[in-house]
Amino acid sequence: MAADFLFQVFPNSGLPIYRQLIDQVRHHVASGRVKPGDFLPSVRQVALELEVNHMTVSKAYSLLERDGVVELVRGQGMRVAPRPAASENGSVRERQEKLLPLLRQVAAEAYQLNLSTAQVKSLIDRVLKELDQS
Amino acid sequence: MNPFPPENALEFRAVSKLYGERAVLDRLDLAIPSGSVVGLLGKNGAGKTTLLRCALGLAKPQHGTVTILGEPAWTLSASAKQYLGYVPQTPQLYPWMRVAHLLDYTGSFYRRWNGALVRQLAADWRLPLNQRAGTLSVGEAQKLTLVMALGHEPDLLILDEPVASLDPSARREFLKVVLEIAAGGNRTVLFSTHITSDLERVADRVAILQNGKISFFGELGELKDQIKRLRLVSVNTFPERFDMPGILTQRIQGKQALVTTRLVTPEMLDRLETDWHATVEVEDLNLEEIFLELHDE
């Protein structure tokens, strides 16, 4: 089954187009809009539709493949990989480490915005809940 | 198509081109791999046209070598020219010829001429086939020159400011054609432009020409990954200048600073944070902003 979603890119953004594509796939996978076993549209299709260079799309796809988000099925295209078991992704500690830099940035911003610890925590709770529900 | 395309469609080695005392190209190196779509970016007068003309053997550099499709550019054989397409900044057309006649005439010089493609493009771009070339508008003349350069489906297509006089919709259609050429795989496109938004869509690589040299050549994504603007806020007052490698521009005002750096590294961020007790925010820049920062040194 083909995944039913459309990419949207902003070529003038500071975020490289291939990163925009990667983020969108990851986002759709995380939100459950795209499920393991779904196929991504072909590189050619995406390039034509978005009017961007096909190398840009294939770079995004191969990085997603490298990270295990999708897998290449010969003759059929890129399929969303089964969600890795938690343990395959490293220990809890290792996975927490990955999140740390982003949280540091959040903490710094929160400090500048003069938000209390409780206020920040409630926001994080809300975002996590949104992810769970979708 | 050439069954054995060279690894690099175009190669400049230590090329210098002087006009009088002025070195427009100054020991310039550049290697464009076959199959890539490269946008050549530079300020007005940076030497983009000179670079393209040297690539085609239309101008002779005083030093260095230029190799195009595996042959020296200056002594390019007639058969190699069959695989080349070139659109100059100012179209060169015989004003008395009618458009249809001009297209046929051009086609007669090429062994492979895709008449169906030419008719298709001429129709898509609403070229007035029965009009004489001399009566065309600037935009129409540019479209005609493009069709003439695409008709033999060249392995290497070189375009000097191809969209400068096209309106936005014609520009979009033209970019689509370039993307289709690119999707075919083995064709190489090199185009100069100062419209950065077009380049962001179409090109997979960008070459920046600055002070007679290529100051950056690589994937567009790579350029955006490397060049970042840092927004620093500290409880202390910053020094007058940061002395760190890779800094392109810096604006410092008391406890706030805006620093653009050529290569952002985690170590650099750590150092800024610990040395100055600063919070550092990393901002992405688009190609236009990067271009301006690079020219503001």
Image (cartoon, helix red, strand yellow):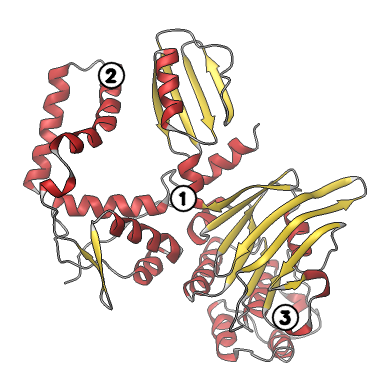
Q: Residues within 10 Å of mark 2 (few under 14, many from 20)?
A: few
Res. B80 mark: 3
Marks 1, 3 in one chain: yes
Residue carrying label 2: A113
Q: CA distance from mark 1 to mark 2?
A: 32 Å
Closer mark to the observer between disc 2 and disc 3? 3
Q: Is residue B277 visible?
A: yes
Residue B69 shown left or right of residue A9 in the figure: right
Q: Could you tell me the amino acid type at mark 2?
A: Leu
- The quadrant the N terminus of chain B occupies is bottom right
Asked which quadrant contains residue B61, the reply is: bottom right
Give me the chain letter of mark 2: A
Q: Please state which amino acid type lies under the numbered disc 3.
A: Ala
Query: Which residue is denoted by mark 1 in the rendering?
Result: B221
Q: CA distance from mark 1 to mark 3?
A: 33 Å
Q: Earlier in the sequence, mark 1 or mark 3?
A: 3
